[in-house]
Image (spheres, helix red, strand yellow):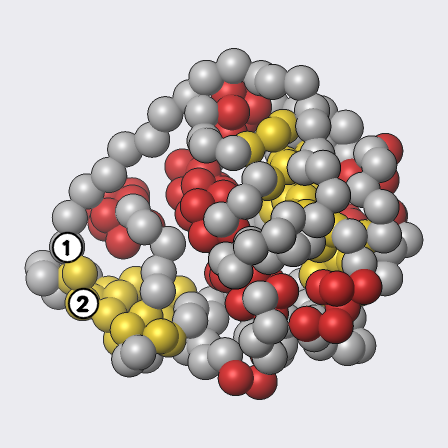
């Protein structure tokens, strides 16, 4: 799929709060009803990572806990986001109840029934590459030894994995969600960027991480 764009964006930071997980299941028509934990697996802060993390927190629509955050800069940036809690400790060290990892290598897809059965969904905070290399399985699933479910065969960015998880937690089914199989971003100056990730298509509109197109244009411009 193709996307034509042009524009700009900047980000922020603050102080680390005490780690805290949301208390129990949330009720309400737009509440997912299951906790979300994003286990950070990137060693340092980056603009691209924060764009995905910011969008993930905004999409979830409830409190989000980021775990395994060792970088002080990343801690401050995450703590500036609304409804976000941050922990230096990994998810396996915290009381998250019955937890399920969202892992592309898992043998079964996530279902609404899973979201009712488990207390916490754990998303791996890993920036994608050109191909999936099974890093979530290696760095998270095998380490924490939680059961796992997949979100389909297409590689999803962190925030889009959260988008899919939320839709399923609210009663949707994975097979009813439409994702691009990669994305070609075309800029007015003729530059093109290939993104090998799946982005959701809702009402014929592709949902892309806010600010990412401007970030890519700035970074590629600097390199050229």
Pick the residue in front: 173 or 188: 173
Element under label 2?
A: strand
Residue 110 figure quarter: bottom right
Q: Which mark is residue 214?
A: none
| Measured Cα–Cα span from mark 1 to mark 2 | 7 Å
Residue 63 located left or right of residue 70: left
Q: Is residue 42 visible to us here?
A: no
Residue 108 vs residue 6, the one in the foreground: 108
**Quadrant of residue 50 within the rendered picture:** top left
Question: Residue 212 location, x and y as percent?
Answer: 32, 50
Residues 137 and 18: in front is 18
Q: Give the residue displayed 18% in from the left and 67% down from the top.
A: 4
The residue located at (90%, 53%) in the rendering is 145
Is any atom of residue 12 visible in this view? Answer: yes
Q: Residue furthest left?
A: 189
In the picture of the structure, the residue carrying the numbered disc 1 is: 6
In the displayed orientation, state which residue is furthest to the right: 145
Q: Which residue is mark 2?
A: 4
**Dot 2: few (<14), some (14–19), or many (≥20) neighbours within 10 Å?**
few
Check the image and report above or below for 35 versus 4: above
Q: Is residue 152 left or right of residue 106?
A: left
6 lies left or right of 202: left
């Amino acid at each position: 799929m193709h996307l034509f764009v042009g524009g700009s964006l900047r980000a922020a930071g603050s102080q680390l709060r005490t780690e805290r997980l949301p208390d129990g299941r949330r009720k309400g028509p737009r509440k997912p009803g299951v906790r979300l934990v994003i286990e950070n697996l990137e060693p340092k802060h980056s603009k691209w990572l924060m764009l995905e993390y910011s969008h993930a927190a905004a999409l979830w629509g409830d409190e989000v806990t980021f775990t395994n955050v060792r970088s002080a800069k990343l801690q401050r940036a995450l703590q500036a986001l609304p409804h976000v809690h941050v922990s230096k400790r990994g998810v396996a060290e915290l009381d998250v109840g019955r937890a399920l990892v969202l892992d592309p290598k898992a043998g079964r897809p996530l279902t609404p029934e899973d979201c009712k059965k488990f207390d916490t969904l754990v998303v791996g905070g890993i920036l994608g590459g050109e191909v999936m290399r099974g890093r979530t399985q290696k760095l998270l699933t095998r380490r924490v030894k939680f059961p796992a479910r997949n979100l389909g065969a297409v590689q999803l960015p962190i925030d889009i994995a959260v988008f899919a998880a939320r839709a399923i937690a609210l009663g949707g089914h994975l097979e009813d969600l439409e994702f691009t199989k990669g994305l070609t971003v075309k800029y007015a100056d003729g530059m093109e960027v290939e993104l090998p990730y799946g982005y959701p298509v809702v009402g014929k509109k592709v949902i892309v991480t806010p600010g990412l197109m401007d970030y890519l244009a700035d970074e590629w411009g600097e390199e050229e």
